[in-house]
Amino acid sequence: MSGSSVAVMDAADVGRALTRIAHEVVERNKGTGDVVLVGIHTRGVPLAGRLAARLGEIEGRPVPAGALDVTMYRDDIGLRPPGATHATHLPFDLGGKVVVLVDDVLYTGRTIRAALDALVDFGRPRAIQLAVLVDRGHRELPLRADYVGKNVPTAADEAVRVRLAETDGADGVVIHRGAGLEPPGTAGPPARPGGGPPPARSGGPPPAARRGTRA
Amino acid sequence: MNKHLLSAADLSAADVTRVLDTAAHLAAVTDRAIKKLPTLRGRTVCNLFFEDSTRTRISFELAAKRLSADVINFSAKGSSVSKGESLKDTAITLEAMGVDAIVIRHGASGAPWRLAEWVDAVVVNAGDGTHEHPTQALLDLYTMRQRFPSFDGLRVAIVGDVLHSRVARSNVLALTTMGAEVTLVAPPTLLPARVETWGVTVSYDLDAVLPKQDVVMLLRMQLERQRAGFFPSLREYARLYGLDARRLDAMAPHAIVMHPGPMNRGVEIAADVADSIERSVIASQVSNGISVRMGLLYLLLGGPAVAGEVPR
Protein backbone atom coordinates (compact mmCIF):
# COMPACT_ATOMS: atom_id res chain seq x y z
CA MET A 1 0.00 0.00 0.00
CA SER A 2 1.37 3.39 -0.97
CA GLY A 3 0.22 6.80 0.19
CA SER A 4 -0.54 8.17 3.62
CA SER A 5 -3.46 8.47 5.98
CA VAL A 6 -4.51 11.50 8.00
CA ALA A 7 -7.03 11.25 10.81
CA VAL A 8 -9.43 14.21 10.61
CA MET A 9 -11.90 13.18 13.35
CA ASP A 10 -11.45 10.90 16.34
CA ALA A 11 -14.19 9.19 18.33
CA ALA A 12 -14.75 12.22 20.58
CA ASP A 13 -14.98 14.53 17.53
CA VAL A 14 -17.60 12.26 15.96
CA GLY A 15 -19.63 12.24 19.19
CA ARG A 16 -19.46 16.04 19.58
CA ALA A 17 -20.41 16.58 15.91
CA LEU A 18 -23.49 14.38 16.30
CA THR A 19 -24.50 16.16 19.51
CA ARG A 20 -24.20 19.55 17.77
CA ILE A 21 -26.17 18.33 14.74
CA ALA A 22 -28.91 17.05 17.09
CA HIS A 23 -29.18 20.49 18.71
CA GLU A 24 -29.26 22.16 15.29
CA VAL A 25 -32.10 19.86 14.21
CA VAL A 26 -34.10 20.79 17.33
CA GLU A 27 -33.40 24.49 16.92
CA ARG A 28 -34.20 24.64 13.23
CA ASN A 29 -37.42 22.61 13.52
CA LYS A 30 -38.47 24.19 16.83
CA GLY A 31 -38.56 20.81 18.51
CA THR A 32 -38.88 17.33 17.08
CA GLY A 33 -42.67 17.12 16.71
CA ASP A 34 -42.80 16.07 13.04
CA VAL A 35 -39.17 15.00 12.70
CA VAL A 36 -38.24 11.48 11.53
CA LEU A 37 -34.72 10.31 10.74
CA VAL A 38 -33.86 8.20 7.69
CA GLY A 39 -30.38 6.72 7.47
CA ILE A 40 -28.93 5.73 4.11
CA HIS A 41 -27.24 2.32 4.00
CA THR A 42 -24.61 1.48 5.08
CA ARG A 43 -23.19 3.95 7.62
CA GLY A 44 -26.05 6.41 7.54
CA VAL A 45 -28.20 3.84 9.35
CA PRO A 46 -26.21 3.70 12.64
CA LEU A 47 -25.66 7.48 12.44
CA ALA A 48 -29.45 8.00 12.20
CA GLY A 49 -29.92 5.73 15.20
CA ARG A 50 -27.43 7.75 17.25
CA LEU A 51 -29.00 11.06 16.22
CA ALA A 52 -32.42 9.69 17.16
CA ALA A 53 -31.11 8.77 20.62
CA ARG A 54 -29.63 12.25 21.13
CA LEU A 55 -32.83 13.95 19.94
CA GLY A 56 -34.80 11.78 22.35
CA GLU A 57 -32.59 12.89 25.23
CA ILE A 58 -32.77 16.57 24.29
CA GLU A 59 -36.54 16.74 23.79
CA GLY A 60 -37.59 13.96 26.15
CA ARG A 61 -39.66 12.14 23.54
CA PRO A 62 -38.58 9.41 21.14
CA VAL A 63 -37.81 10.29 17.53
CA PRO A 64 -38.35 7.44 15.01
CA ALA A 65 -35.49 6.34 12.78
CA GLY A 66 -35.59 4.23 9.63
CA ALA A 67 -33.22 2.75 7.07
CA LEU A 68 -33.23 3.46 3.35
CA ASP A 69 -31.53 1.48 0.59
CA VAL A 70 -31.05 3.56 -2.55
CA THR A 71 -29.42 0.86 -4.70
CA MET A 72 -32.44 0.46 -6.97
CA TYR A 73 -32.67 4.25 -7.51
CA ARG A 74 -29.04 4.96 -8.45
CA ASP A 75 -28.21 6.74 -11.69
CA ASP A 76 -25.35 4.36 -12.52
CA ILE A 77 -27.47 1.20 -12.83
CA GLY A 78 -26.37 -0.48 -16.02
CA LEU A 79 -22.96 1.21 -15.93
CA ARG A 80 -21.39 -1.08 -13.34
CA PRO A 81 -22.10 -4.53 -11.96
CA PRO A 82 -25.33 -4.64 -9.97
CA GLY A 83 -24.67 -3.58 -6.39
CA ALA A 84 -25.76 -5.48 -3.32
CA THR A 85 -29.10 -4.42 -1.91
CA HIS A 86 -30.14 -3.85 1.70
CA ALA A 87 -33.47 -3.87 3.46
CA THR A 88 -35.42 -0.61 3.45
CA HIS A 89 -37.31 -0.19 6.70
CA LEU A 90 -39.36 2.95 7.25
CA PRO A 91 -41.63 2.18 10.21
CA PHE A 92 -43.64 5.40 9.89
CA ASP A 93 -45.80 7.30 7.43
CA LEU A 94 -43.77 10.01 5.70
CA GLY A 95 -46.79 12.17 4.87
CA GLY A 96 -46.49 15.61 6.48
CA LYS A 97 -43.25 14.74 8.29
CA VAL A 98 -39.92 16.53 8.29
CA VAL A 99 -37.50 13.87 7.11
CA VAL A 100 -33.86 14.29 8.08
CA LEU A 101 -31.82 12.15 5.70
CA VAL A 102 -28.60 10.95 7.32
CA ASP A 103 -25.43 9.76 5.53
CA ASP A 104 -21.78 9.50 6.45
CA VAL A 105 -20.04 11.34 3.58
CA LEU A 106 -21.48 13.88 1.15
CA TYR A 107 -19.44 13.80 -2.06
CA THR A 108 -20.93 13.97 -5.57
CA GLY A 109 -24.49 14.17 -4.27
CA ARG A 110 -25.66 11.28 -6.45
CA THR A 111 -26.57 9.06 -3.50
CA ILE A 112 -28.69 11.86 -2.06
CA ARG A 113 -30.46 12.36 -5.39
CA ALA A 114 -31.29 8.65 -5.42
CA ALA A 115 -32.48 8.88 -1.82
CA LEU A 116 -34.80 11.80 -2.65
CA ASP A 117 -36.37 9.76 -5.46
CA ALA A 118 -36.76 6.77 -3.15
CA LEU A 119 -38.35 8.81 -0.36
CA VAL A 120 -41.09 10.31 -2.49
CA ASP A 121 -42.17 6.79 -3.48
CA PHE A 122 -43.06 6.24 0.17
CA GLY A 123 -45.05 9.41 0.71
CA ARG A 124 -44.99 13.19 0.57
CA PRO A 125 -42.96 14.62 3.40
CA ARG A 126 -43.52 18.26 4.41
CA ALA A 127 -39.78 18.83 4.08
CA ILE A 128 -36.59 16.85 3.58
CA GLN A 129 -33.35 17.96 5.25
CA LEU A 130 -29.90 16.45 4.96
CA ALA A 131 -27.41 15.66 7.74
CA VAL A 132 -23.92 14.31 6.99
CA LEU A 133 -20.96 13.57 9.20
CA VAL A 134 -18.45 14.74 6.57
CA ASP A 135 -18.84 17.03 3.56
CA ARG A 136 -15.82 16.45 1.33
CA GLY A 137 -16.89 18.68 -1.58
CA HIS A 138 -16.74 17.80 -5.33
CA ARG A 139 -20.49 18.02 -5.84
CA GLU A 140 -21.80 16.96 -9.24
CA LEU A 141 -25.41 17.93 -8.51
CA PRO A 142 -27.01 21.10 -7.10
CA LEU A 143 -27.38 19.76 -3.55
CA ARG A 144 -26.14 20.88 -0.15
CA ALA A 145 -26.38 19.56 3.38
CA ASP A 146 -28.42 21.28 6.11
CA TYR A 147 -26.29 19.86 8.93
CA VAL A 148 -22.59 19.06 8.54
CA GLY A 149 -20.38 17.40 11.15
CA LYS A 150 -17.18 18.57 9.53
CA ASN A 151 -16.23 20.12 6.20
CA VAL A 152 -13.16 18.30 4.93
CA PRO A 153 -11.50 19.75 1.81
CA THR A 154 -10.23 16.88 -0.30
CA ALA A 155 -8.64 16.14 -3.65
CA ALA A 156 -10.42 13.83 -6.07
CA ASP A 157 -7.79 11.11 -5.65
CA GLU A 158 -8.23 11.03 -1.89
CA ALA A 159 -10.55 8.65 -0.08
CA VAL A 160 -12.53 9.65 3.00
CA ARG A 161 -13.15 6.67 5.23
CA VAL A 162 -15.71 6.96 8.02
CA ARG A 163 -15.48 4.27 10.65
CA LEU A 164 -18.27 3.67 13.15
CA ALA A 165 -18.37 1.41 16.18
CA GLU A 166 -21.46 -0.38 14.84
CA THR A 167 -19.93 -1.29 11.49
CA ASP A 168 -16.15 -1.00 11.96
CA GLY A 169 -15.47 -1.46 15.67
CA ALA A 170 -14.51 2.14 16.45
CA ASP A 171 -15.41 5.73 15.53
CA GLY A 172 -13.18 7.94 13.42
CA VAL A 173 -12.71 9.65 10.06
CA VAL A 174 -9.52 9.20 8.04
CA ILE A 175 -8.40 10.62 4.69
CA HIS A 176 -6.31 8.25 2.63
CA ARG A 177 -3.93 10.00 0.22
CA GLY A 178 -2.21 8.45 -2.77
CA ALA A 179 -3.38 6.69 -5.88
CA GLY A 180 -4.04 3.00 -6.10
CA LEU A 181 -5.02 2.72 -2.49
CA GLU A 182 -7.80 0.28 -1.70
CA PRO A 183 -9.19 0.53 1.79
CA PRO A 184 -9.10 -2.89 3.41
CA GLY A 185 -12.10 -5.06 2.73
CA THR A 186 -13.21 -3.10 -0.31
CA ALA A 187 -13.48 -5.55 -3.15
CA GLY A 188 -14.99 -2.88 -5.33
CA PRO A 189 -16.34 -3.02 -8.86
CA PRO A 190 -13.88 -2.58 -11.72
CA ALA A 191 -12.41 0.83 -12.47
CA ARG A 192 -14.49 3.49 -14.09
CA PRO A 193 -15.74 2.33 -17.50
CA GLY A 194 -14.07 4.10 -20.39
CA GLY A 195 -10.71 4.35 -18.66
CA GLY A 196 -11.36 7.60 -16.85
CA PRO A 197 -9.39 8.77 -13.83
CA PRO A 198 -8.93 6.22 -11.08
CA PRO A 199 -11.92 6.19 -8.75
CA ALA A 200 -11.40 8.10 -5.56
CA ARG A 201 -13.01 5.91 -2.98
CA SER A 202 -14.89 7.68 -0.31
CA GLY A 203 -14.20 5.02 2.25
CA GLY A 204 -14.40 1.40 3.10
CA PRO A 205 -18.12 0.62 2.89
CA PRO A 206 -19.14 -2.22 0.61
CA PRO A 207 -19.11 -1.30 -3.06
CA ALA A 208 -22.87 -1.48 -3.18
CA ALA A 209 -23.27 1.33 -0.73
CA ARG A 210 -20.58 3.48 -2.16
CA ARG A 211 -20.00 2.23 -5.69
CA GLY A 212 -16.50 3.57 -6.19
CA THR A 213 -16.54 7.21 -7.14
CA ARG A 214 -20.12 7.93 -6.18
CA ALA A 215 -21.18 9.15 -2.80
CA MET B 1 -23.30 -14.89 -11.89
CA ASN B 2 -23.42 -16.05 -15.48
CA LYS B 3 -24.93 -13.81 -18.12
CA HIS B 4 -27.92 -16.12 -18.59
CA LEU B 5 -29.92 -18.29 -16.21
CA LEU B 6 -30.36 -21.52 -18.14
CA SER B 7 -29.84 -24.15 -15.46
CA ALA B 8 -29.90 -24.18 -11.69
CA ALA B 9 -26.45 -25.75 -12.05
CA ASP B 10 -25.18 -22.36 -13.30
CA LEU B 11 -25.65 -20.96 -9.81
CA SER B 12 -23.04 -21.28 -7.08
CA ALA B 13 -24.08 -21.28 -3.44
CA ALA B 14 -23.01 -17.61 -3.31
CA ASP B 15 -25.14 -16.83 -6.38
CA VAL B 16 -28.20 -18.50 -4.87
CA THR B 17 -27.72 -16.63 -1.60
CA ARG B 18 -27.34 -13.35 -3.48
CA VAL B 19 -30.54 -13.89 -5.47
CA LEU B 20 -32.47 -14.84 -2.31
CA ASP B 21 -31.06 -11.89 -0.31
CA THR B 22 -31.86 -9.44 -3.11
CA ALA B 23 -35.35 -10.91 -3.39
CA ALA B 24 -35.88 -10.49 0.34
CA HIS B 25 -34.92 -6.81 0.11
CA LEU B 26 -37.26 -6.29 -2.84
CA ALA B 27 -40.21 -8.14 -1.29
CA ALA B 28 -41.23 -5.06 0.69
CA VAL B 29 -41.97 -3.17 -2.55
CA THR B 30 -45.20 -5.17 -2.76
CA ASP B 31 -46.38 -3.59 0.50
CA ARG B 32 -45.74 -0.03 -0.59
CA ALA B 33 -48.20 2.50 -1.94
CA ILE B 34 -46.13 2.74 -5.14
CA LYS B 35 -45.27 -0.85 -6.04
CA LYS B 36 -42.59 0.14 -8.51
CA LEU B 37 -38.87 0.78 -8.61
CA PRO B 38 -37.19 2.74 -11.42
CA THR B 39 -34.29 0.30 -11.67
CA LEU B 40 -34.75 -1.24 -15.13
CA ARG B 41 -36.25 1.81 -16.83
CA GLY B 42 -35.64 1.62 -20.57
CA ARG B 43 -34.93 -2.11 -20.55
CA THR B 44 -37.20 -4.48 -22.45
CA VAL B 45 -38.05 -7.99 -21.32
CA CYS B 46 -39.79 -10.40 -23.69
CA ASN B 47 -41.77 -13.32 -22.28
CA LEU B 48 -41.45 -15.90 -25.05
CA PHE B 49 -43.87 -18.68 -24.14
CA PHE B 50 -44.31 -21.67 -26.41
CA GLU B 51 -46.19 -23.60 -23.71
CA ASP B 52 -49.21 -22.66 -21.67
CA SER B 53 -48.52 -20.93 -18.37
CA THR B 54 -50.42 -18.83 -15.90
CA ARG B 55 -48.33 -18.21 -12.83
CA THR B 56 -44.85 -18.19 -14.35
CA ARG B 57 -45.67 -15.76 -17.15
CA ILE B 58 -47.68 -13.41 -14.94
CA SER B 59 -45.02 -13.63 -12.25
CA PHE B 60 -42.23 -12.67 -14.67
CA GLU B 61 -44.42 -9.91 -16.12
CA LEU B 62 -45.18 -8.42 -12.71
CA ALA B 63 -41.55 -8.72 -11.63
CA ALA B 64 -40.31 -6.89 -14.72
CA LYS B 65 -43.00 -4.21 -14.43
CA ARG B 66 -42.25 -3.58 -10.74
CA LEU B 67 -38.69 -2.83 -11.86
CA SER B 68 -40.04 -0.46 -14.57
CA ALA B 69 -38.90 -2.61 -17.51
CA ASP B 70 -41.05 -2.71 -20.62
CA VAL B 71 -42.63 -6.13 -21.11
CA ILE B 72 -43.62 -7.86 -24.32
CA ASN B 73 -45.68 -11.01 -23.98
CA PHE B 74 -45.30 -13.46 -26.79
CA SER B 75 -47.22 -16.70 -26.88
CA ALA B 76 -46.92 -19.20 -29.69
CA LYS B 77 -50.67 -19.22 -30.19
CA GLY B 78 -51.69 -16.34 -32.38
CA SER B 79 -48.11 -15.56 -33.47
CA SER B 80 -46.09 -16.33 -36.59
CA VAL B 81 -45.09 -19.61 -34.93
CA SER B 82 -48.50 -20.95 -35.93
CA LYS B 83 -47.52 -20.03 -39.52
CA GLY B 84 -44.45 -22.24 -39.15
CA GLU B 85 -41.79 -19.73 -38.06
CA SER B 86 -38.82 -21.43 -36.39
CA LEU B 87 -37.47 -20.63 -32.94
CA LYS B 88 -34.34 -19.21 -34.55
CA ASP B 89 -36.25 -16.84 -36.82
CA THR B 90 -38.44 -15.77 -33.91
CA ALA B 91 -35.30 -15.10 -31.85
CA ILE B 92 -33.67 -13.08 -34.63
CA THR B 93 -36.85 -11.04 -34.98
CA LEU B 94 -36.92 -10.26 -31.26
CA GLU B 95 -33.22 -9.39 -31.31
CA ALA B 96 -33.80 -7.01 -34.21
CA MET B 97 -36.45 -5.27 -32.10
CA GLY B 98 -33.88 -4.68 -29.37
CA VAL B 99 -35.03 -6.72 -26.42
CA ASP B 100 -32.61 -6.89 -23.48
CA ALA B 101 -33.85 -10.14 -21.97
CA ILE B 102 -35.83 -13.11 -23.23
CA VAL B 103 -37.71 -15.25 -20.74
CA ILE B 104 -38.39 -18.49 -22.59
CA ARG B 105 -40.67 -21.41 -21.92
CA HIS B 106 -40.48 -24.15 -24.51
CA GLY B 107 -41.65 -27.73 -24.80
CA ALA B 108 -38.27 -28.89 -26.04
CA SER B 109 -35.59 -29.58 -23.46
CA GLY B 110 -32.52 -27.46 -24.25
CA ALA B 111 -34.34 -24.77 -26.26
CA PRO B 112 -33.02 -21.94 -24.00
CA TRP B 113 -29.42 -23.03 -24.69
CA ARG B 114 -29.98 -22.81 -28.45
CA LEU B 115 -31.64 -19.42 -28.00
CA ALA B 116 -28.68 -18.14 -25.96
CA GLU B 117 -26.37 -19.02 -28.85
CA TRP B 118 -28.39 -16.97 -31.31
CA VAL B 119 -29.05 -13.74 -29.41
CA ASP B 120 -27.08 -11.16 -27.44
CA ALA B 121 -29.96 -10.68 -25.01
CA VAL B 122 -29.95 -12.22 -21.55
CA VAL B 123 -31.84 -15.55 -21.66
CA VAL B 124 -33.80 -16.84 -18.68
CA ASN B 125 -35.11 -20.40 -18.76
CA ALA B 126 -38.72 -20.38 -17.56
CA GLY B 127 -39.12 -24.11 -18.16
CA ASP B 128 -37.81 -26.25 -21.01
CA GLY B 129 -39.64 -29.51 -21.63
CA THR B 130 -38.98 -32.05 -18.90
CA HIS B 131 -35.55 -30.57 -18.22
CA GLU B 132 -35.24 -27.50 -15.98
CA HIS B 133 -37.14 -24.64 -14.36
CA PRO B 134 -34.46 -22.78 -12.40
CA THR B 135 -36.55 -19.80 -11.24
CA GLN B 136 -39.07 -22.21 -9.71
CA ALA B 137 -36.21 -23.78 -7.76
CA LEU B 138 -35.07 -20.34 -6.59
CA LEU B 139 -38.52 -19.37 -5.36
CA ASP B 140 -38.86 -22.77 -3.67
CA LEU B 141 -35.55 -22.23 -1.86
CA TYR B 142 -36.66 -18.72 -0.90
CA THR B 143 -39.86 -20.16 0.57
CA MET B 144 -37.90 -22.80 2.51
CA ARG B 145 -35.52 -20.16 3.84
CA GLN B 146 -38.48 -18.24 5.27
CA ARG B 147 -39.18 -21.23 7.53
CA PHE B 148 -35.75 -22.75 8.11
CA PRO B 149 -32.57 -20.95 9.14
CA SER B 150 -30.20 -22.94 6.93
CA PHE B 151 -30.14 -25.32 3.99
CA ASP B 152 -27.28 -27.24 5.53
CA GLY B 153 -28.69 -30.68 6.33
CA LEU B 154 -32.27 -29.58 5.55
CA ARG B 155 -34.21 -32.71 4.59
CA VAL B 156 -36.37 -32.24 1.50
CA ALA B 157 -38.48 -34.97 -0.08
CA ILE B 158 -39.58 -34.44 -3.70
CA VAL B 159 -42.50 -36.74 -4.37
CA GLY B 160 -44.14 -37.82 -7.61
CA ASP B 161 -43.55 -37.60 -11.32
CA VAL B 162 -39.80 -36.91 -11.19
CA LEU B 163 -39.33 -38.36 -14.67
CA HIS B 164 -41.25 -35.54 -16.36
CA SER B 165 -40.50 -32.82 -13.82
CA ARG B 166 -38.29 -29.86 -14.66
CA VAL B 167 -39.13 -28.53 -11.20
CA ALA B 168 -37.56 -31.62 -9.62
CA ARG B 169 -34.37 -31.39 -11.68
CA SER B 170 -33.77 -27.73 -10.91
CA ASN B 171 -34.63 -28.16 -7.24
CA VAL B 172 -32.25 -31.10 -6.86
CA LEU B 173 -29.44 -29.06 -8.42
CA ALA B 174 -30.06 -25.96 -6.31
CA LEU B 175 -30.76 -27.82 -3.07
CA THR B 176 -27.66 -30.01 -3.31
CA THR B 177 -25.58 -26.91 -4.11
CA MET B 178 -26.86 -25.41 -0.85
CA GLY B 179 -26.14 -28.53 1.19
CA ALA B 180 -29.66 -29.89 1.63
CA GLU B 181 -30.36 -33.63 1.80
CA VAL B 182 -32.81 -34.49 -0.96
CA THR B 183 -34.89 -37.66 -1.17
CA LEU B 184 -36.81 -38.45 -4.34
CA VAL B 185 -39.93 -40.54 -3.80
CA ALA B 186 -41.76 -42.03 -6.79
CA PRO B 187 -42.88 -45.28 -8.34
CA PRO B 188 -39.90 -46.82 -10.21
CA THR B 189 -41.54 -46.06 -13.55
CA LEU B 190 -41.57 -42.31 -12.81
CA LEU B 191 -37.88 -42.02 -11.91
CA PRO B 192 -35.43 -41.09 -14.68
CA ALA B 193 -32.59 -43.35 -15.78
CA ARG B 194 -29.32 -42.81 -13.90
CA VAL B 195 -31.07 -40.96 -11.07
CA GLU B 196 -28.47 -42.52 -8.76
CA THR B 197 -25.91 -40.07 -10.21
CA TRP B 198 -27.90 -37.07 -8.94
CA GLY B 199 -26.45 -37.17 -5.45
CA VAL B 200 -29.82 -37.82 -3.82
CA THR B 201 -31.53 -40.63 -1.90
CA VAL B 202 -34.21 -42.52 -3.81
CA SER B 203 -37.18 -44.28 -2.24
CA TYR B 204 -40.34 -45.96 -3.48
CA ASP B 205 -41.99 -45.82 -0.07
CA LEU B 206 -43.52 -42.46 0.88
CA ASP B 207 -44.74 -43.56 4.32
CA ALA B 208 -41.22 -44.58 5.34
CA VAL B 209 -39.71 -41.26 4.21
CA LEU B 210 -42.31 -38.77 5.46
CA PRO B 211 -41.59 -38.59 9.22
CA LYS B 212 -37.94 -37.55 8.71
CA GLN B 213 -38.54 -34.65 6.34
CA ASP B 214 -38.47 -30.89 6.95
CA VAL B 215 -40.02 -30.16 3.55
CA VAL B 216 -42.30 -32.32 1.43
CA MET B 217 -42.64 -31.10 -2.14
CA LEU B 218 -45.34 -32.72 -4.25
CA LEU B 219 -44.98 -32.76 -8.02
CA ARG B 220 -47.82 -32.50 -10.46
CA MET B 221 -48.71 -35.70 -12.25
CA GLN B 222 -47.88 -34.50 -15.78
CA LEU B 223 -50.47 -36.46 -17.67
CA GLU B 224 -49.96 -34.36 -20.79
CA ARG B 225 -46.34 -35.50 -21.06
CA GLN B 226 -46.89 -39.15 -20.17
CA ARG B 227 -46.94 -41.25 -23.33
CA ALA B 228 -47.21 -44.67 -21.71
CA GLY B 229 -48.94 -46.32 -18.78
CA PHE B 230 -46.54 -45.45 -15.94
CA PHE B 231 -48.90 -46.74 -13.25
CA PRO B 232 -52.16 -48.69 -13.25
CA SER B 233 -54.54 -45.87 -12.29
CA LEU B 234 -54.59 -42.36 -10.84
CA ARG B 235 -56.50 -43.76 -7.88
CA GLU B 236 -53.74 -46.23 -7.12
CA TYR B 237 -51.14 -43.49 -7.50
CA ALA B 238 -53.05 -41.27 -5.08
CA ARG B 239 -53.30 -44.11 -2.57
CA LEU B 240 -49.56 -44.88 -2.68
CA TYR B 241 -48.01 -41.45 -3.29
CA GLY B 242 -50.69 -38.82 -2.65
CA LEU B 243 -50.34 -36.58 0.41
CA ASP B 244 -53.59 -36.83 2.37
CA ALA B 245 -54.53 -35.83 5.91
CA ARG B 246 -53.35 -39.15 7.35
CA ARG B 247 -49.90 -38.76 5.83
CA LEU B 248 -49.79 -35.09 6.87
CA ASP B 249 -50.21 -36.27 10.47
CA ALA B 250 -47.23 -38.59 10.01
CA MET B 251 -44.98 -35.65 9.11
CA ALA B 252 -42.89 -33.83 11.71
CA PRO B 253 -44.89 -31.00 13.33
CA HIS B 254 -42.57 -28.33 11.89
CA ALA B 255 -42.50 -29.81 8.37
CA ILE B 256 -44.05 -27.87 5.47
CA VAL B 257 -45.86 -28.90 2.30
CA MET B 258 -44.95 -27.40 -1.07
CA HIS B 259 -46.32 -27.76 -4.58
CA PRO B 260 -45.15 -25.86 -7.69
CA GLY B 261 -48.67 -25.79 -9.13
CA PRO B 262 -50.91 -26.26 -10.93
CA MET B 263 -52.25 -28.90 -8.54
CA ASN B 264 -54.25 -32.02 -9.35
CA ARG B 265 -56.29 -32.01 -6.17
CA GLY B 266 -57.11 -35.52 -5.05
CA VAL B 267 -54.20 -37.01 -7.00
CA GLU B 268 -50.76 -35.95 -5.68
CA ILE B 269 -52.25 -33.76 -2.94
CA ALA B 270 -55.55 -33.89 -1.08
CA ALA B 271 -57.57 -30.68 -1.11
CA ASP B 272 -57.56 -30.27 2.68
CA VAL B 273 -53.75 -30.65 2.75
CA ALA B 274 -53.28 -28.08 -0.01
CA ASP B 275 -55.49 -25.64 1.87
CA SER B 276 -53.93 -26.28 5.30
CA ILE B 277 -52.99 -22.84 6.61
CA GLU B 278 -50.48 -24.17 9.13
CA ARG B 279 -48.61 -26.63 6.92
CA SER B 280 -49.04 -25.63 3.27
CA VAL B 281 -46.85 -22.82 1.92
CA ILE B 282 -48.20 -23.15 -1.62
CA ALA B 283 -49.70 -19.65 -1.65
CA SER B 284 -46.42 -18.18 -0.34
CA GLN B 285 -44.57 -19.90 -3.17
CA VAL B 286 -46.63 -17.92 -5.67
CA SER B 287 -46.14 -14.54 -4.01
CA ASN B 288 -42.45 -15.23 -3.39
CA GLY B 289 -42.05 -15.97 -7.09
CA ILE B 290 -42.47 -12.27 -7.91
CA SER B 291 -39.79 -11.14 -5.44
CA VAL B 292 -37.35 -13.82 -6.56
CA ARG B 293 -37.82 -12.96 -10.24
CA MET B 294 -37.39 -9.25 -9.43
CA GLY B 295 -34.13 -10.04 -7.69
CA LEU B 296 -32.99 -12.19 -10.58
CA LEU B 297 -33.92 -9.66 -13.28
CA TYR B 298 -32.09 -6.94 -11.34
CA LEU B 299 -28.95 -9.06 -11.00
CA LEU B 300 -29.02 -10.15 -14.67
CA LEU B 301 -30.05 -6.82 -16.23
CA GLY B 302 -28.80 -4.25 -13.69
CA GLY B 303 -25.21 -4.36 -14.95
CA PRO B 304 -23.54 -3.27 -18.17
CA ALA B 305 -25.16 -4.71 -21.32
CA VAL B 306 -22.11 -6.90 -21.87
CA ALA B 307 -19.93 -7.60 -18.85
CA GLY B 308 -16.77 -5.52 -18.97
CA GLU B 309 -17.86 -3.56 -22.02
CA VAL B 310 -17.96 0.22 -22.12
CA PRO B 311 -21.58 1.18 -21.43
CA ARG B 312 -23.78 2.23 -24.26
Image (cartoon, coloured by chain):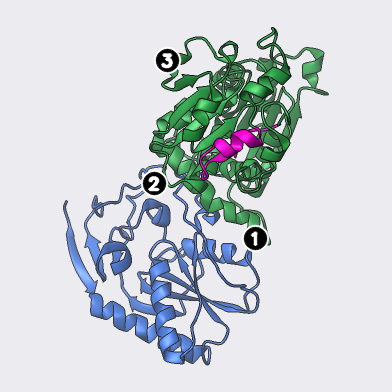
Q: Colour of chain A?
A: blue
The reply to whether residue A182 is in sight is yes
Using the image, name the chain to which the residue with label 2 belongs.
A
The green-coloured chain is labelled B
Q: Quadrant of the C terminus of chain A?
A: bottom left
**A214 relative position to B131: left or right:** left
Q: Judge if badges 3 and 1 mark residues of a common chain.
A: yes
Mark 3 — residue?
A: B197
Amino acid carrying mark 3 in the image:
Thr
Q: Position of residue A114 (x, y in %)?
A: 53, 61
For image coordinates 64% across by 40% down, the residue present is B282
Using the image, name the chain to which the residue with label 3 belongs.
B
Q: Position of residue A144 (x, y in %)?
A: 47, 74
Please determine whether, in this image, residue B176 is positioned above or below residue A185.
Answer: above
**A18 relative position to A28: left or right:** left
Q: In 3D space, how far apart are the residues under numbered discs 3 and 1 (Cα atoms)?
A: 46 Å
In this view, the mark in front (2 or 3):
3
